[in-house]
Image (cartoon, rainbow, N blue to C red):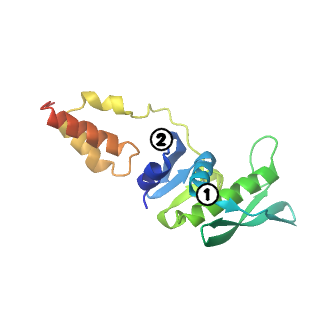
Amino acid sequence: MTIHDLQKKYNLTKDDFWEVRKGTWVVTHNACEKIAEIEQIVFTEPRFHQALNSICFLGSAKKGEKIIWATGEASEINVKGQGKYYFSMAEKRLKDRLTLKIINAYEYGIYSDVEAEAFKKKETKEKPINFFDYKDLSDAEINQFIVNNKDHSQLDEVIQYRDKRQKDGIKF
């Protein structure tokens, strides 16, 4: 399973996932909720545990006959920002972990954005490349982009655009 397989299967948009480093992808909590709904994952009511300055939910999920368990924790150390909603964050982490575990996403380097601050989407000053930017590229530039960006979220769109342009006899 690749991130592109996940994108197609669950109809995820480019805003639902990003790459934090080569081979490590992050999906949003909302994307995990979409996946859980599509897969009809059933969550059990979690058990609550507290230790020192952290809380933990232990719960399980079922998809068909497959049942798995996981934990979701929250503490002053791993919950940032105003309000510090420890219970909400622990629940999000639990459900996202259960969802990603039950579809085997972890073994392919796919995580949830609520699992670590390091996974938060970085705001860039660069303008993201979008499909319409490709219309002015030469054939060689498009081919070079395809070779160098095998994991790019719009790779399929670029290939389709190139193939249509070639089919129509348009050369740049």
Residue at 75%, 64% in the rendered image? 44
Identify whether 30 is placed above or below 95. above
Q: How crowded is the residue under tag 1: few (<14 C-alpha within 10 Å), some, or many (20+)? A: few
Identify the disc placed on residue 14.
2
| Amino acid at circle 1 | Gln
Identify whether 36 is placed above or below 68. above
* SS assignment at label 2: helix
Mark before the other along the chain sequence, 2 or 1 = 2
Q: Quadrant of the C terminus?
A: top left
Identify the disc placed on residue 40.
1
| Amino acid at circle 2 | Lys
Q: Find residue 165 and report its image quarter.
A: top left
Is 27 positioned to the left or the right of 134 in the image?
right
Spatial CA span between label 2 and label 1: 23 Å
Is 55 positioned to the left or the right of 162 in the image?
right
| Tag nearer the camera, 2 or 1 | 1
User: Which residue is at the front of the view, 156 or 110?
Assistant: 156
Percent across and percent down for residue 85 are 80, 47
Residue at 26%, 49% in the rendered image? 147
User: Which residue is at the front of the view, 120 or 101?
Assistant: 101
Residue at 51%, 47% in the rendered image? 17
Q: Find residue 54 and report its image quarter.
A: bottom right
Residue at 33%, 51% in the rendered image? 150
Percent across and percent down for residue 81 are 75, 42
Percent across and percent down for residue 114 are 66, 52
Percent across and percent down for residue 48 are 84, 64
